[in-house]
């Protein structure tokens, strides 16, 4: 990609996700006003999920794995 000069202001996950959104917008040719609000918000959500390490495809698998871990454990009394 030519001229890929993205500045990240801050080091928070939302800031990095915003920079990733800008990269995606350029890559898909949507940086010149070609994106609507729904596309921007859903893509930003996916960018933020990528930054924090969330994988939507394996999210349901992780929930099932958590249930499996509880099997065989004795409940603890408070």
Image (tube, rainbow, N blue to C red):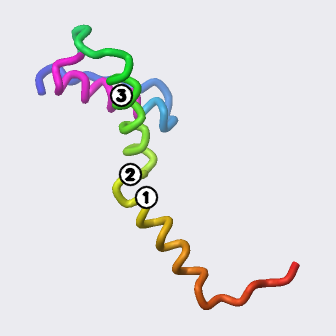
Dot 3 falls on a residue whose secondary structure is helix
Q: Is residue 18 magenta?
A: yes
Tag nearer the camera, 3 or 2: 2
Dot 1 falls on a residue whose secondary structure is helix
What secondary structure do most residues of the magenta stretch adopt? helix
Q: Quadrant of the N terminus?
A: top left
Q: Is residue 55 magenta?
A: no
Q: Disc number at residue 56? A: 2
Q: Quick one: label 3, few (<14), some, or many (20+) residues within 10 Å?
A: some
Front residue of 33/27: it is 33
Q: Disc number at residue 45? A: none
Disc 3 target residue: 19
Task: Residue at 43% x, 58% y: name it.
Answer: 59
Q: Quick one: label 1, few (<14), some, or many (20+) residues within 10 Å?
A: few
Using the numbered discs, state the Cα–Cα distance from disc 3 to disc 2 in whole angstroms.
20 Å
Above or below, comparing residue 37 to residue 19 in the picture: above
Above or below, comparing residue 49 to residue 37 in the picture: below
Disc 1 target residue: 59
Dot 2 falls on a residue whose secondary structure is helix
First to last magenta residue range: 17-30
Answer with mark 3 or mark 1, whichever residue precedes in sequence. Answer: 3
Asked if the residue under mark 1 is in contact with the one under mark 2, i.e. CB atoms within 8 Å, the reply is yes
């Amino acid at each position: 990609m030519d001229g890929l000069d993205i500045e990240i202001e801050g080091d928070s996950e939302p800031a990095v996700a915003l920079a990733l959104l800008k990269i995606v917008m350029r890559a898909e040719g949507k940086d010149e006003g070609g994106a609507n609000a729904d596309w921007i918000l859903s893509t930003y959500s996916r960018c933020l999920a990528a930054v924090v390490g969330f994988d939507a495809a394996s999210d349901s698998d992780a929930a099932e794995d958590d249930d499996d871990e509880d099997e065989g454990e004795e409940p603890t009394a408070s």
